[in-house]
Amino acid sequence: MYHTSYDTEKRQWNGVKTNPSFNSQTSLGSVILNTLLENGLKVAQVCAITGAKTTFNELHTLSICAAKKLQSLGYKKGDVILLFTNNSADVQPLVFAALSLGCPILAEVTVHGAAEICRTLTSIRPKIVICDDKFYPMLKECMISMKIIPDFFIFGNQPADTRPIKYLFENFDDELHFVPAKINAIDDVAFMVCTSGSTGNAKGVPLTHANVLNRMSKMSFMTPDDVMIGFTSVDAISGIRYLISGTLNGSTRIVNQGKFTVERLFELVEKFKITFTSSTMFCVHQMLNHPKIETANLSSMKIFRAGGATMSYKDIQKLNQYLPNGKFAHSLGMTEMAGVVSINLLHANNNCVGQLVDDLEAKIVDDQGERLGVNEIGELCLRDPFLFKGYLGDDESTSKCFDSEGFFKTGDLARFDENNDLFIIDRKKEQFKCLSYHVIPAEIQEFLNQIDGVYDSCVVPIPDPNYDSLPAAVLIKADNSTCTEESIEDAVANNFADHKQLRGGVYFVDSFPKTNTGKLARRSVIEMAQKLYNESKKKAQQN
């Protein structure tokens, strides 16, 4: 159980101090391989579609087989592997094989389009691409345009000049002797997870072996008796946490293929007697408003964890009513901190995100960087013994995300109460979510401002409980512009992922409101867009 203490003199909140369970030469891959052996014949994962079970021993064998095959092909420590695939039972041994070889895994989000992928590839150049067959044409074109020549391993139908995934598991010589690559846990990268910055384009967050081991080996709310389900793959920190923490804790994971649906969640929980799940507030909202929740059997569930946004106390109470033998655990997590940083496992008396996890330090600061005290609202800053090194290829953003004391500036407005519970008040950052995915206004604005006839643009969120938020674009036309709402919507649709589509509408205005210093008054633009959205919606209903 986690516990937070408050140092009144320093004005600093601290998680429980622990001793590291690894040294500087310990690789995540070697720890995983040892864990797989220790758990032996216990079931490690079950395919949700076929029901096929894989033991820890079998997963160990598959992981070594893939590692030795990649090694025989000449791949070595430091060679980046781009993973662009939906979840399947074969993904896990490939991840473990890469970690054992010291090959950093670039976990690219599979909803990203070509423009977003090419942006990532400006700072990361993979030697291997592992992808589903449907993604191959787009990825191939991206590699050609970026002058990268990787080897492709394909799930599904095999195009020319590629190898099938099954090749990595063929002709195994039954020799299990394998020595994982020697690594420096503090400096060598295990995962590169694409995430969104507060005001710029998507960034690559390098997480070292120490980052991941320190954070994901201490998820004390997971046990070997747990049966877990997650609906994200390793293209997100939540999917990486689900795989690594579940494995290190000896839990059984249900490998789901396909997107989240409420019906699917209810079906799998009842079928496999799932005890633990990790989700987003978007999914929770869908669940609470689904008619089948009244008859769903969630009696096996012990912990239903969710984060990514604030949740009202009323909804927390409502969800707990459907968990007769469990409870909802509100939490805060972020890619840069390699996962969960706080979680409420102690009570359901409010909508806090609970106590800090072990070894974490936190402070709340004002706009001048001065530390604040109990129940004072400011920016949440975090520090642990193994902070990430910064954003790949983005020295400017890296320099801005750490303060002089080595704390990571989260961009979240927060406070700690007198019980040392953490409350998230709002996002200081401009990013928002649609369909549980991050939307960064500056990324779309940069694109819109290059369209002929657009003078300036501002992308803002329109609140919507069914989507989290709807992206909307407020534009100023250039002189003699022929742009229309439809042409702008089509341009975005053809260049960005589904969650970045302008579902909130396109609105043309004469000018943007500004602050006294001449800066864009974004809050006023948001209010303007929300008013225009409501007016257009009302007009549509009248017609």
Image: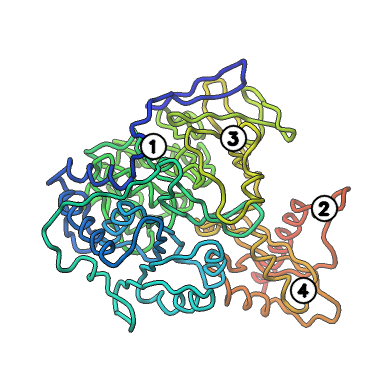
Count neighbours of disc 1 (C-alpha within 10 A) and say few if under 14, some if 14 to 19, many if 20 or more.
Answer: few
* Residue identified by numbered label 1: 24
User: Residue drawn 28% across and 63% down?
Assistant: 70
Distance between mark 4 and mark 1 Cα atoms: 53 Å
From the viewer's perspective, is residue 98 above or below residue 454?
above
Identify the residue at horizontal 64%, vertical 65% (top origin).
504
Q: Please give the count of numbered marks on the rendered protein.
A: 4
Residue identified by numbered label 2: 519
Report the disc number at residue 454. 4
Q: Nearer the viewer, residue 166 or 104?
A: 104
Identify the residue shown where x is 62% and y is 78%: 490
Q: How far from the left and from the top, in percent, is residue 500?
A: 58, 65
Mark 3 / mark 4, whichever is N-terminal: 3
Residue 134's disc is none
Q: Image point 40% across, 43% down: which residue?
A: 184
Amino acid at dot 4:
Val
Q: How much space separates mark 1 and mark 2, taking CA atoms?
A: 47 Å
Which quadrant of the figure contains the C terminus?
Answer: bottom right
Q: Amino acid at mark 3?
A: Phe
